[in-house]
């Protein structure tokens, strides 16, 4: 009987974690293979801080002290920086399963603002405790580096890709990428709500608001998408991909 209790305990912990974290980018930290029940309990305690961030509230601000990384359990965020003249430049959009805050590891202060575009739930993981735990858990240490490397590679790829594109290609690429991200999380790939405004989208893509509105109208007239306020329906995904040519 004593031999089965640790196994049952481990299975219960894993089951509970998988229910809420199976789609999260931090699952490699929370659900590593080969850990015993005591180690799993330590990880469970580390990732146990959950909280809501209301629409329009900051998760963190530029210049604030770096203390944790954040996994989005539900909702949507934007990250942005302010230019000297007060103009906002949106640097990213983040949804359920994404990680936020990694940009501050080297400087120990956040280099951008993170604002909730809708009421969202995050999992807050203190980075000092995570670092301490990773030093005694080699698998955790390795997976932490993989996550950071993957996030950096993704951001670099997006920057390079957008830099090569014309205006129509940028919006097409964004819609396709967002569709794929929703699909990977179990949502519809063909119909989804845009949480950001067109002005925020234009800031991210390096396009003027008028240009974003014009391209949306053009895509709708050509039967590529349907637009109803913030609801987007991809009617011809292959057509959008053809716009990208060799860049897709």
Image (cartoon, rainbow, N blue to C red):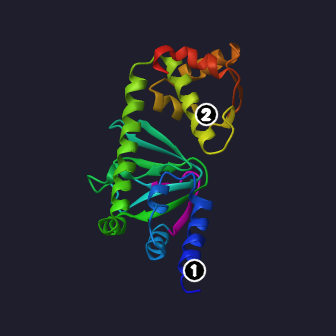
Pointer 2 or 1: first along the chain:
1
* Residue 92 in the image: above or below residue 57: above
| Residue 195 visible in rendering | no
The part of the image, by quadrant, that contains residue 34 is: bottom left
Q: Is residue 85 above or below residue 2?
A: above
Q: Residue at x 52, y 25 (%)?
A: 173
Task: Please identify the quarter of the rendering in which residue 187 is found.
Answer: top right
Give the image location of residue 236, x and y in percent: 68, 20
Residue 106 screen position, x and y as percent: 26, 52
Mark 2 sits on what residue? 179
> Going by the picture, which residue comes out furthest to the left?
107
Classify mark 2: helix, strand or loop. Answer: helix
Q: Residues within 10 Å of mark 1 (few under 14, many from 20)?
A: few
Question: Does 40 appear above or below 161?
Answer: below
**Is residue 221 or residue 173 the one in the foreground?**
173
User: What residue lies at 57% left-to-right and 19% top-to-bottom?
Assistant: 241
> Which residue bears the numbered disc 1?
4
Q: Is residue 133 left or right of residue 167?
A: left
| Place of residue 12 in the rendered image (x, y in percent of width and height, measured from the top left) | 60, 72
Report, in whole angstroms, how far the alpha carbon at label 2 lies from the one at label 1. Answer: 44 Å
Q: Which range is magenta?
A: 48-59
Q: Give the label on residue 15, or none.
A: none
Task: Report whether residue 105 is seen.
Answer: yes
């Amino acid at each position: 009987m004593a031999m089965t209790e640790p196994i049952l305990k481990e299975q219960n912990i894993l089951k509970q974690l998988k229910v809420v974290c199976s789609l999260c980018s931090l699952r490699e930290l929370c659900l590593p293979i080969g850990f015993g029940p005591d180690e799993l309990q330590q990880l469970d305690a580390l990732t146990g801080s959950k909280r809501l961030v209301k629409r329009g509230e900051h998760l963190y601000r530029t210049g604030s002290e770096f203390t944790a990384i954040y996994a989005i359990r539900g909702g949507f965020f934007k990250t942005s920086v302010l230019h000297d003249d007060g103009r906002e430049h949106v640097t990213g959009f983040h949804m359920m399963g994404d990680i936020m805050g990694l940009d501050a590891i080297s400087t120990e202060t956040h280099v951008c603002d993170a604002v909730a575009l809708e009421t969202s739930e995050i999992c807050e993981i203190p980075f000092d405790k995570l670092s301490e735990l990773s030093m005694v858990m080699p698998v955790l240490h390795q997976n932490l580096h993989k996550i950071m490397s993957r996030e950096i590679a993704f951001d670099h790829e997006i920057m390079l890709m957008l830099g090569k594109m014309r205006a129509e290609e940028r919006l097409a690429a964004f819609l396709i990428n967002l569709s794929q991200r929703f699909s990977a999380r179990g949502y519809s790939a063909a119909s989804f709500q845009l949480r950001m405004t067109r002005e925020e989208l234009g800031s991210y893509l390096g396009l003027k608001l008028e240009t974003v509105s014009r391209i949306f109208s053009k895509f709708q007239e050509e039967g590529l998408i349907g637009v109803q306020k913030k609801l987007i329906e991809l009617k011809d995904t292959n057509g959008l991909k053809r716009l990208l040519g060799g860049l897709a």
